[in-house]
Amino acid sequence: MIVIRQGYGLFRAAVTGLSRVAGAISAALIFILMFVVVYEVMLRYVLRQPTRWSFELSGFMLTAIVLLSLSYVLEKDRHIRVVILSSRLSPQASHWLYVFTSFFSFVLCVLVTKAAWDFTWLAYQNCETSIGGLEAPMFLVKGLVLLGVGLLGLRFVVDACEHIRALRRKYPEPQQH
């Protein structure tokens, strides 16, 4: 049992660390995106010479911002939550509901991650590039789905485990990290 606890502790720490790194990258990309947009606006409206790449890069960066922040937002419990059902449940039933929804969400993340892997690998094999002025390798863009949703799935596993641990401790709130 001690080995399982230590293994879980390492798993939880790894997922938490990766979520925080992904969240920090996402936050940095917000500032970089701001400069890209300001640069484009200045060139377009002041110098009348718009770039060919900024719109496409902005879309890719926004995609990265959203996907890389998913796990971090779930870890910090800062997502939108509909509590119509869970607020009416006992603490025990509420924990079981979160275990079920976390497991179901994990399964969905596994399916999306598998599809993202297939699409990313195909884009890599075919040397697929974007059709805009940037001509970015699409395996990098599609790989963002793979990374973001894969990390989100791992976070759902941690959340399910934390709610199970709370059930074993007789219903206190799961630990936030």
Image (tube, rainbow, N blue to C red):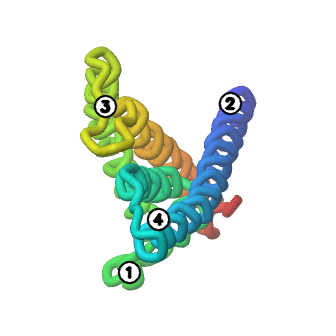
Residue corresponding to mark 3: 129
Mark 1 residue type = Val
Q: Position of residue 137 (x, y in %)?
A: 38, 30
Reading the image, the residue beneath label 4 is 40
Q: Nearer the viewer, residue 146 or 154?
A: 146
Measuring 53% from the left and 70% from the top, which residue is drawn there?
38
Give the numbered dot on residue 83: 1
> Rounded to the nearest whole Å, what is the CA distance between mark 4 and mark 1?
42 Å
Identify the image quadrant of residue 59.
bottom left
Contact between labelled residues 3 and 1, with CB atoms less than 8 Å apart: no
Answer with left or right where residue 34 lies relative to residue 87.
right
Q: Amino acid at mark 3?
A: Thr
- Label 4–label 1 contact, CB within 8 A: no
Q: Which image quadrant is residue 139 in?
A: top left
The residue singled out by tag 2 in the image is 7
Secondary element type, mark 1: loop
Is 30 situated above or below 115?
below
For label 2, count other residues whose C-alpha is less than 10 Å away and answer few (under 14), some (14-19) or many (20+). few
Residue at point 59% right, 59% down? 32
Q: Earlier in the sequence, mark 1 or mark 3?
A: 1
Q: Amino acid at mark 4?
A: Glu
